[in-house]
Amino acid sequence: MDRLYFSGEQLTTPALRFNPSSIQARHQNARRGVTLYGPYDSQRFGKDRVTACLIYPQGLERERDFVKEGLIRGNGAFDGFQSLFRIPIDFIGERRAKSEVGSDLRGEIQAIFRGAPPDIVILLTSRRNEAIYRMAKAQSLGNGIPSQVVTAEKLANRDQVQWMLGDIALQIYAKVGGTPWTVLSTSPQNELVLGVSRAVDRQRNLVVGFVTLFTHDGDYQFLYSLSPRPSEWSRLNEYRDSLAQLIVEAYTEYEKQQDAPTSLVVHLCKRPGKYREIAAVEQALQTIGDTVPYALVHLNDDTNYRLFDTAHPTCVPETGIKVNLSCHSALLFLDGRPPGTRGGMRKRRGVPRVLEVVMDRRSTMSIDEFPRLVRQVFEFARVNWRGFNAQAIPATLNYSYLVARLVAEIGAQNWNPIASTGRLRDKAWFL
């Protein structure tokens, strides 16, 4: 049997940064870095406290106290919200529903917004209920406030609750507009990066989600997440126009904050179509009146390729392995063993994730940039604020999917009033 030979390399793990003013405030471990240095934006967060309102059904008083005490004072290895993020969390309101029936909980959520709203709404339920989850998200987001759902079922695992509380605190900080950490980037200073993904709603329509990030002073920054309007992937003109409008808005917003971007990268969860994505970029650049080089990059997390390391007992390769398939396509291993440790073990179960990265040949950016773009994808996998040990998925792919999924769950017909307020644009409300 003939053998095929491919070239590859081990990408070095990028450093996480926790202070924009100090290159020394860096660490490979997100939890340890925040503990040592605080969050990346602690000196410019713009708040002296994070205000929260807790809603719970009758019968969960014990769990209510557990959540409040845990976030304020800590639990085990988790030292509390203020210790970790250098800012207190203040429970300014508390409402008890008569039952866990959706209408009772909805009434208590609505009551919150009759007065001064908190920064975040925390809803405690006995177990995950999709109908209640959708209702809570729609009610809070409709008022421009993110929410955090906590289930008593998960709190029952006392061995894991210290880590779960840490992840809840992390999500809360990001949802209210904080930047827990960022990644020291190898990309140009003024590059604008967009993520585009999709999800299926209850009517089996494909809904598109967008997020935008950019590089500044060598660090990746989150810009905003809302698409101009929900758009169904199957509708050619609507999807093209929505993507074009997003690019124009992102370009304009970036130009206001920094300067005109010098390059544009669009990460797509599907292979670019014959006309849609190219037409959208060209339409946007024509509207802007600029000719910046751009790259359309397909991030395929459902590839048929698999990677194995036969020199290790588990056959799992190290994280960061890159295999070149051609000058414009490569495999990237994001979910393997810790690099540099021959005896290291992968903590998660299941088949490790292999990502196929393909740069569309119609991109106007030089093909010589492709190795850097693959490296950029690897760096984005470290900007995941869903948890300190969250699965390694590029933020552009993961966040845009979470946006699309939440829009699909709430219902596209309910989304326009939420999107039009603009109060959530610079917050990671979708985590």
Image (spheres, rainbow, N blue to C red):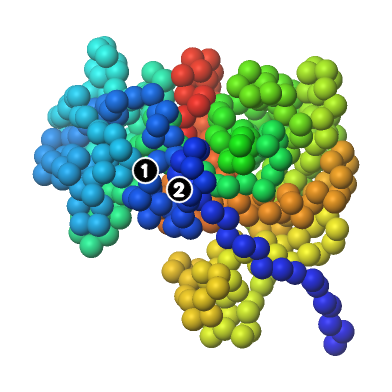
Q: Residue at x 52, y 76 (%)?
A: 341
Mark 1, residue position = 38
Task: Please state which amino acid type lies under the numbered disc 1.
Answer: Gly
Which amino acid type is marked by label 2? Ala
Residue 100 in the image, given as x and y percentages of width and height: 22, 35
Q: Quadrant of residue 44?
A: top left
Viewer-side residue, 40 vs 108: 40
**Does 365 appear above or below 341?**
above
> Answer yes or no: do the residues labelled 2 and 1 have beta carbons within 8 Å?
no
The image position of residue 295, as x and y in percent, is: 79, 41
Q: Quadrant of the C terminus?
A: top left
Work out whether 209 lies above or below 249.
below
Image position of 370 (left or right of 101): right
Reading the image, the residue beneath label 2 is: 25
Residue 180, numbered circle: none
Q: 129 or 420, which is in the foreground?
A: 420
Q: Earlier in the sequence, mark 2 or mark 1?
A: 2
Residue 67 horizontal/vertical position (percent): 20, 43
402 relative position to 324: left or right: left
Q: Is residue 93 visible?
A: yes
Q: Nearer the viewer, residue 114 or 39?
A: 39
Secondary structure beneath dot 2 equals: loop
User: Which quadrant of the figure contains the N terminus?
Assistant: bottom right
Distance between the Cα atoms at labels 2 and 1?
9 Å
Quadrant in the rendering for residue 292: top right
